[in-house]
Image (spheres, coloured by chain):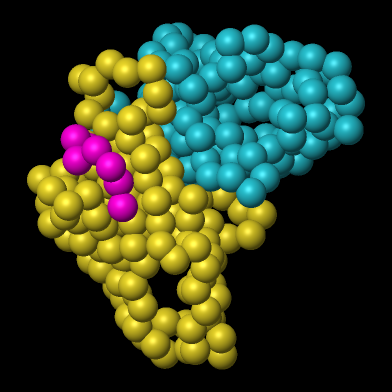
Chain colours: A cyan, B yellow
């Protein structure tokens, strides 16, 4: 059973471009969570999704950021018009429905130049 | 608002020592508490998860305790090894029935552990 997969592992974007981060949950997991780890800071919750539904996006910036978890395919975290302050490690986690233990992916390190 | 702190921020010990990492949280209304390990440039590895009704969990050389009333958890590592060198994070999850405007899962800032051969 493969773990949580994230791609790309490293992403470089110039200011103003779009960044798309993908997360494939563990097999059998229907809950996905996105976290951001800024340099020298701890992990911060961004958004919690179930298939086709955003359950809690209270940690996500109101502008430029969006997330989805379609019925088929990976969860996508999309950042439009990236700025240098978006440079961070973005982690995805998944859990089985009704099971609160979260399993984390290796993260995507976004660098905005 | 739930806040999670970890002491110490960094710790360096000789190989073979037993050590304790501390985690404190301000709101005792938690669903569970989880300890993670993060290696430099890598993702998170879950070490132990303690449900709010439990007092401790053990896995190999690791033992985590939870005292909700005092808002504390400790991670005990026995007979430390150089391979234990990493950052250790604790995270608390609020009950999902609670509606708030802040983070659902709160991570502490981590303790950076270095085990010297």
Horizontal and vertical percent for residue B40? 63, 59
* In magenta stretch: residue A71: no
Foreground residue among A54 and A62: A62
Q: Quadrant of residue A29?
A: top left
Q: Which residues are magenta?
A: B24-30
Foreground residue among B56 and B9: B9
Foreground residue among A13 and B103: B103
Q: Overall secondary structure of the magenta stretch?
A: loop
Where does the N terminus of chain A fall, quadrant-wise? top left
Please name the residue shown 69% across and 38% down the image: A88
Where does the C terminus of chain A fall, quadrant-wise? top right
- Count the numbered circles shown: 0
Q: Above or below — where is B56 with respect to B98?
A: below
Is residue B92 left or right of B50 when viewed as pictured? right
Q: Quadrant of residue A91?
A: top right
Is residue B62 shown to the viewer in this render? no
């Amino acid at each position: 059973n493969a773990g949580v997969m994230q791609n790309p592992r490293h992403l470089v974007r110039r200011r103003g471009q779009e960044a798309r981060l993908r997360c494939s949950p563990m097999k059998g997991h229907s809950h996905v969570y996105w976290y951001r780890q800024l340099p020298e800071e701890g992990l911060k919750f961004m958004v919690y999704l179930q298939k086709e539904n955003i359950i809690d996006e209270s940690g996500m910036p109101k502008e430029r950021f969006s997330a989805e978890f379609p019925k088929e395919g990976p969860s996508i975290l999309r950042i439009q018009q990236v700025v240098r302050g978006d440079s961070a490690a973005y982690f995805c986690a998944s859990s089985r429905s009704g099971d609160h233990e979260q399993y984390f992916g290796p993260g995507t390190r976004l660098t905005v130049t | 608002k739930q806040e999670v702190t970890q002491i110490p921020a960094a710790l360096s010990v000789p190989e073979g020592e037993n050590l304790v990492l501390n985690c404190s949280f301000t709101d005792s209304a938690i669903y569970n508490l989880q300890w993670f390990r993060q290696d430099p440039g890598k993702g998170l590895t879950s070490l132990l998860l303690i449900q709010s009704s439990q007092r401790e969990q053990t896995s190999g050389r690791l033992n985590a305790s939870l005292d909700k009333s005092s808002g504390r958890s400790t991670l005990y590592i026995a007979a430390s090894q150089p391979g234990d060198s990493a950052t250790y994070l604790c995270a608390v999850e609020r009950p999902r029935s609670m509606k708030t405007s802040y983070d659902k899962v709160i991570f502490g800032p981590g303790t950076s552990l270095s085990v010297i051969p």
